[in-house]
Amino acid sequence: MKFPLLEQYGLQDQPFTCAQCSFCQVGNGACPTYKVKRRDSYSGKGKMILARTLIQGRIKPSEGLEGLRDAIFGCTLCGGCEEICQVDIPFVKIYQLLRADFLRRGMWPEELVPMKETLVDDFNVQGQDNDDRVEGWSYWHPDEDALLEKVGQNAKTAFFFGCNSSFRGVPIQGTIATLLIMDKIGEDYTVLGDEEWCCGAPLIMTGDFDSARKFAEHNIKQYKELGVQRIVTNCPGCYKMWAHEYHEFLDIDHPFEVVYGAQYFSRLIDEGKLAEFTNPLDVTVTFHDGCDAGRNSGIYEEPRKVLEHLPGVTLEELPHNKANCYCCGSGGVLRPVDADFALEINKLKVEDIEQTSADWVIAACPSCVDFMNDQLPQTGSQKRVKDLSVLVAEALGLTWDGLDEIYG
Ligand code: SF4
Ligand code: SF4
């Protein structure tokens, strides 16, 4: 049998290059889904062997296709297998193409259908009124009127929130922190408010490229009309879409520079714009490299540089950090497909975190922050999680009502 999308992207030979060394199963920090399931098909190696056996016709589709589908969607797209693979198989891209292939075969997991319907109806993955992207929490901002004036303004820099950072209480604090930092340094910026639609990541990650196109085109049109030249986003999933995947999977090229939040803060430090850290924090933190910023985009140094500049902050690395960092379990749209599986993966993450003496887990990803904020207390952990932007804002002496309400 054939996988037409692998052929279209010239990747149909990749499953045959696996040397079966098993590094992707047992290597340092490697595959979280294999660690939990202990079944070959839940590792990179197993998926490649199953795909090539189907391509060769050594097993019939009726014998192996459903199992491959379950394993392809039972994956966090964390990039661990790609990081460690000795023959450099581009796994994350292959998995997304195979997900698109399963959609075209009518074999998309039925659990994903409500997620898609929510996105198409509401333009955000939480299913909330899209007016609430700003208005849902603007009362937490110290100058609500000034914030609302930013909505739809012409400006060269745009702050793209992303869905978690617009609608979930804890990640919203990272949004407010970044807005206040932008105000403090005198950045001229715009936000889209209800005209910001999901970046389309949940659709692109699950292979529904056609539906994602509408979201990408909408946001691009809005920014062009406002004269935007640069997009800043705290969400590494959104960053990856804007920076790479619109081009890669939708064949869309846009004119904007795309800057991830940790890169933005790092540049501000270089430019001397973030010099007034007046509030020493006196805290030991550890840093979680979210998969889309770390392994999937190669951004490791900027967040650490930012942490080094914050007075009173001591960084204690996780046992598995940077390219070996354990996935938190929330990636790859695994949670709607199998929430319990994602929770099992998260337990491994918590075990890693518990080996540090850190008071706070710092992440630069709203999805990781949100998931870990839910799960750390469930495991009895005393540690709490904050977005990097929140720590930066606190070190600058910035305060707002939401911060007190969420973190007490
Ligand atoms: S992307 Fe991550 S979860 Fe998926 S197979 Fe590779 S290592 Fe495992
Ligand atoms: S690390 Fe690469 S070559 Fe080795 S078993 Fe995994 S997929 Fe195959």
Image (cartoon, rainbow, N blue to C red):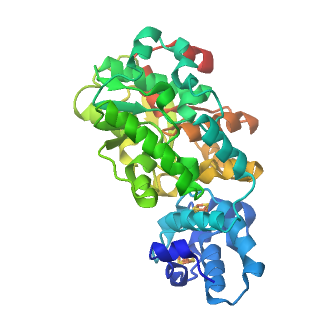
144, above or below 305, in the image? above
109, above or below 160, in the image? below
Name the one closer to the observer, 61 or 326: 61
Residue 368 position, x and y percent, is 58, 41
Q: Quadrant of ligand 1?
A: bottom right
Work out which quarter of the rendered image holds the C terminus and state it: top right
Name the one closer to the observer, 333 or 4: 4
- The residue lying at 47 percent from left, 74 percent from top is 8
Residue 212 position, x and y percent, is 52, 50
Residue 185 position, x and y percent, is 29, 21
- The number of discs equals 0
Work out which quarter of the rendered image holds the N terminus and state it: bottom right
Q: Is residue 180 left or right of residue 202?
A: left
Name the one closer to the observer, 360 or 181: 181
- The residue lying at 39 percent from left, 19 percent from top is 150
Q: Is residue 185 left or right of residue 387?
A: left
Name the one closer to the observer, 343 or 133: 133
Camera sees residue 236: no
- The residue lying at 39 percent from left, 31 percent from top is 159
Q: Is residue 53 left or right of residue 211?
A: right
Residue 45 position, x and y percent, is 60, 75
**What is the quadrant of residue 267 in the picture?**
top left
Camera sees residue 340: yes
**What is the quadrant of residue 229 in the picture?**
top left
